Structure formats: C-alpha cells, structure tokens
C-alpha cells in the first residue's frame, strides 16, 4: 500500500483520471555519488539509498498502470569505475534481488533483464536467473533492469545477427527495415519508451536505449536519485500528459488523427 501525502494522492488521482499514462517508462537513475559526497558519506551510501528510491518508483509505477519500467542500473562504462565501488555495486545487486523478489511476486511484478550478462560475476548471474524465473508468470508491471548495458553495444549486436542471417540466406537486403532491426534488439518484447526520465540534472542520454528513444519524451530533473520521491515521479507524469506527441507530424494532423480515433 502506497503511503502518499494528501497532495500527492490528489495528483495521483488526477493523473489516473486523465488516462494519458506512459505504457513504457525508462529512467536514468543519476546522482547517487553526488548525493553521498554532499553528505560526506562514501559513494556506496548513495547507492544503498538509491535502492530505496527504486522500491518506491516500482510501487508507484504499478499503481499508475505503467506496463513497462526500464531502469538504467549499470552501464558497460560503469565497469571503468574503481574496483571497490564496482564490487560493492555487484554485492548490492545480489542483496537487493534476494530481498526484493518475494515482494515483486506479491505485487505481480515480472522481473526482466537487458544487457551483456557475460561480464557479470557468476553469483550475480545466478541470482538474476533465479529472480527472472521466479517472476516469469507475473502479469503486472514488467520491471526491466539494464545491467552491463550499452545502447551502442546493443545496436552492434543486432547488426551482427542481421549480417549472419543475410550471409546464411535467411533474409534479403529488402527485408531489412526498422521492424526487422527492432526484432533483433534486446527490447524486442517491449514497446519503445514513451517517457525517459533522468534524475541528477545532466542533459545527456548516456548511451541508453539509443534506438528505442528516438521519439520518447524526455524529462530531466535536478533532483538526485536518492532524493527522488513519489512527488517527483508524479510531476514527471503530469508534465508528460501536457505534451503533444507529434512523431514528425504537425499539430493539426495530430488533432485530426485523435479525432478519428475517438469516433472509430
């Protein structure tokens, strides 16, 4: 059960009544290290606090009716960080999976993963496999963790698969289009994100879902991830609901298209 303040609860009801809720929400969870530094704490303290924020965001996303939530948990570039921090992060991932899988099941959340898992420690791979297996029959929110993930890596892997299929005569050049390319991405089972949220204030996408966010709405907040609260997610959704998604069209075309859908 969500414990929202009066104002947050009213905003939640307003957003749900509006009905324009993102089907797929992607988040770049930035600011753990800066949060810890500001408080004179080790960086790991920021990562631990960030896990608490993840828990809140998952609960609120499910309450909002979001179907897919993809979190940038650990990038391939993060392997370049100090070894002690990487080791601590890996242990934190294992502990979080052990602690949270029962609750995910209780809330009908299905856990899924994207990324190059071959570089992850064996203990992390095993915990991931077990958590994914235990939640595979859940039909609520799809929680996708991007681990050891890179948008460029994902695109290159898709290119390699397509080239192999062409070399083996499975496809022709004429078969190669956006739909076929998307079917070779790790997110092939998910719709593209409607909304990308980045905490921490940085104005970049950091090699995240590069193909998939071509037409995603982007919302950046200066709030550091450990301080990201229910209200911050609700405000992001409120901002999203005010936007007109044109996908290359002009406003008049979008309005006509929406009118046709209402009368069909």
Image: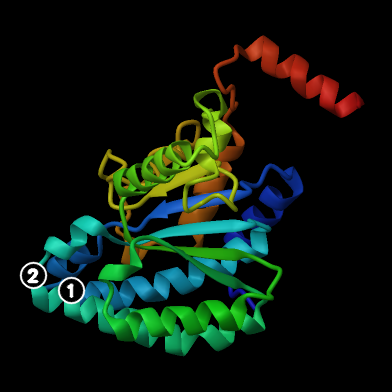
38 with respect to 257 (left or right): left
Q: Which residue is mark 2?
A: 82
Tag shown at residue 181 = none
Residue displayed at 60% across by 26% down: 244
| Above or below 22: residue 40 | below
The kind of secondary structure element at disc 2 is loop
Q: In the rendered view, does 211 fall on the left or right side of 258?
A: left
Q: Position of residue 201 (x, y in %)?
A: 28, 46
* Circles 2 and 1 in contact, beta carbons < 8 Å: yes
Q: What is the quadrant of the C terminus in the image? A: top right
Please rate how many residues cluster around mark 2, counting C-alpha atoms within 10 Å: few if below 14, some from 14 to 19, many from 20: few
Query: Where does residue 33 sit, x and y in percent of width and height?
Result: 18, 65
Of residue 111 and residue 176, the one placed in the foreground of this image is: 176
Q: Which mark is residue 86?
A: 1
Q: Position of residue 174 (x, y in %)?
A: 55, 23
Label 1: how many Cα within 10 Å (few below 14, some 14–19, many 20+): some
């Amino acid at each position: 059960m969500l414990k929202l303040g009066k104002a947050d609860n009213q905003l939640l009801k307003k957003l749900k009544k509006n009905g324009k809720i993102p089907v797929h929400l992607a988040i770049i969870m930035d600011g753990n290290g800066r949060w810890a530094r500001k408080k004179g704490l080790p960086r790991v303290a920021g990562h631990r606090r960030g896990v608490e924020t993840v828990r809140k965001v998952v609960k609120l996303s499910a309450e909002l009716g979001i179907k897919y939530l993809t979190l940038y948990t650990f990038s391939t570039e993060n392997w370049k960080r100090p070894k002690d921090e990487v080791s601590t992060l890996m242990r934190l991932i294992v502990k979080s999976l052990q602690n949270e899988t029962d609750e995910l099941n209780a809330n009908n959340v299905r856990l899924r993963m994207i990324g190059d898992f071959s570089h992850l420690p064996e203990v992390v791979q095993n915990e991931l496999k077990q958590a994914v297996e235990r939640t595979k029959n859940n039909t609520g929110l799809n929680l996708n963790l991007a681990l050891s993930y890179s948008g460029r890596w994902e695109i290159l892997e898709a290119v390699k698969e397509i080239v192999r299929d062409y070399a083996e005569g499975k496809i022709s050049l004429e078969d190669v289009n956006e739909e076929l390319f998307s079917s070779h991405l790790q997110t092939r089972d998910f719709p593209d994100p409607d909304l990308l949220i980045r905490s921490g204030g940085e104005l970049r996408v950091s090699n995240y879902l590069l193909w998939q966010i071509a037409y995603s709405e982007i919302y950046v907040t200066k709030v550091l991830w450990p301080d990201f609260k229910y209200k911050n997610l609700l405000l992001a959704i409120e901002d999203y609901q005010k936007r007109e998604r044109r996908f290359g069209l002009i406003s008049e075309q979008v309005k006509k298209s929406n009118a046709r859908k209402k009368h069909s």
